[in-house]
Image: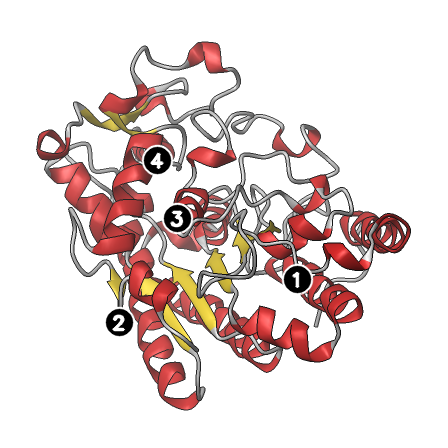
């Protein structure tokens, strides 16, 4: 199931073994029950957060290959740091500390109990274009190894309780569709091939959710894909194309995104019926972003088309190579770079996902807050 032949897998395995040895040498038994919220015990119904995803969850430093892997893409895909990204904002709302990247773990059991960010920029659901990039399966393997490590240190029963009360956050698919649209000559319209590809992506995501459930995970958040047809990069690519739409978003691209999102949510509804005791929610970031894009002034934005940090048409020809390239006021923009939103957008998304304000029902069937406060 997992990709075993890549350099990133080897380095990840070496890292995992080193982490295990360090924990054996440095950790005493009194450290096993450090609270993730800085208080005694585990007062919150969500004790830890484990994040898997792409540049929507990682600024690009969670890889042994940084900065080589980025090449001419954004070296700064975040407006500041990982802490400006949606999962970190939601972790803060749950009272959790900053969820540290996988490759920055130092052997502290306290860090593992708080959670781990396995996400990596350019990560894909399918087998990656380059061995320097990560895939969903590689991150899933890292997550399972972490669960095994917790079982070793805490014992089977305690680790099971911890995992059941932890939240797993999945955000993938963006880079798969981008690669398909850019590299596949048949991707000029959302025909059978494009729709079939989105179905394959959804099938892979559902398999991952089922695998997590089999590993005693009971709280899962699955994020939809943003409207890539409105992103500065796609708008820039299509600007001089005969099929480009200079008056607005590229609808054919957005149709592929909608097909993925709709099918994924439908499959999640089915899973919630079948997987006893599990709570899986789908967060419709597409609908929220379209609201910001078509009614920007209502949410305090002045520019819903151009990237704050980038070059070329719409700032989408090349990504954010240096923070010095950024616009004077990022909070006035919807888009930060090629495909990623600004911190201001992430804050609105976090508030909406958490409580339904300002945008109701973007997370379904319940809000993030309801998921956090519920028992499995």
- Measure the alpha-carbon separation of dots 1 and 4: 27 Å
Query: Is residue 116 positioned above or below 367 on the image?
Result: above
State the mark number for residue 341.
4
Along the line of sight, which residue is nearer the eye, 46 or 7?
46
* x, y percent for residue 346: 33, 39
Pointer 1: what residue? 143
CB under 8 Å between callouts 3 and 2?
A: no
The residue where tag 2 is placed is: 365
Q: Are marks 1 and 4 in contact (CB under 8 Å)?
A: no
**Image position, residue 147 (x, y; %):** 69, 67
Residue positioned 39% across, 36% down in the render: 340
**Image-based side of 277 in relation to 261, left or right:** right
Q: Residue at x 47, y 52 (%)?
A: 180
Mark 3 vs mark 4, CA separation in Å: 16 Å
- Compare marks 3 and 4 and give the one earlier in the sequence: 3
* Disc number lying in front (2 or 4): 2
Disc nearer the start of the sequence (2/1): 1
Q: How many marks?
A: 4
Q: CA distance from mark 3 to mark 2?
A: 17 Å
Foreground residue among 120 and 126: 120
Q: Quadrant of the N terminus?
A: bottom right
**Could you tell me how far apart the alpha carbons at marks 2 and 1 are, in whole angstroms?**
26 Å
Q: Position of residue 16 (x, y in %)?
A: 81, 54
Q: Earlier in the sequence, mark 3 or mark 1?
A: 3
């Amino acid at each position: 199931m997992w990709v075993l032949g890549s350099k990133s897998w080897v380095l990840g395995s070496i890292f995992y073994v080193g982490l295990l040895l360090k924990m054996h040498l440095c950790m005493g038994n009194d450290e096993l029950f450090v609270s993730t919220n800085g208080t005694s015990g585990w007062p919150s119904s969500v004790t830890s957060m484990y994040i898997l995803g792409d540049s929507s969850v990682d600024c690009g430093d969670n890889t042994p290959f940084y900065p080589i892997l980025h090449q001419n893409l954004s070296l700064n895909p975040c407006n500041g740091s990982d802490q400006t990204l949606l999962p970190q904002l939601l972790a803060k709302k749950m009272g959790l500390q900053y969820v540290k990247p996988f490759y920055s773990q130092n052997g502290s059991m306290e860090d593992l109990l708080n959670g781990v960010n396995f996400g990596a920029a350019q990560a894909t659901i399918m087998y990656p274009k380059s061995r320097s990039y990560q895939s969903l399966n590689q991150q899933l393997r890292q997550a399972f190894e972490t669960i095994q490590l917790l079982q070793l240190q805490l014992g089977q029963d305690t680790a099971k309780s911890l995992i059941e009360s932890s939240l797993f956050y999945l955000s993938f698919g963006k880079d798969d569709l981008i690669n398909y649209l850019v590299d596949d000559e048949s991707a000029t319209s959302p025909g059978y091939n494009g729709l079939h590809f989105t179905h394959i992506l959804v099938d892979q995501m559902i398999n991952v959710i089922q695998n997590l459930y089999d590993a005693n995970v009971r709280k899962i958040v699955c994020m939809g894909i943003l409207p890539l047809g409105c992103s500065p990069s796609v708008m820039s690519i299509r600007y001089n194309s005969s099929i480009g739409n200079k008056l607005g978003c590229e609808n054919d691209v957005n149709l592929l995104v909608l097909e993925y999102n709709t099918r994924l949510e439908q499959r999640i509804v089915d899973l919630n019926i079948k997987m006893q005791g599990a709570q899986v929610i789908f967060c419709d970031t597409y609908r929220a972003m379209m609201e910001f894009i078509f009614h920007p002034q209502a949410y305090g934005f002045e520019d819903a088309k151009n990237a704050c940090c980038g070059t070329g048409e719409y700032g989408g020809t090349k990504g954010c190579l240096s923070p010095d390239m950024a616009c004077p006021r990022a909070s006035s923009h919807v888009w930060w770079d090629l495909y990623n939103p600004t911190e201001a957008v992430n804050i609105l998304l976090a508030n909406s996902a958490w409580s339904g304000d300002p945008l109701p029902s973007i997370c379904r069937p319940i809000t993030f807050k309801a998921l956090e406060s519920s028992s499995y």
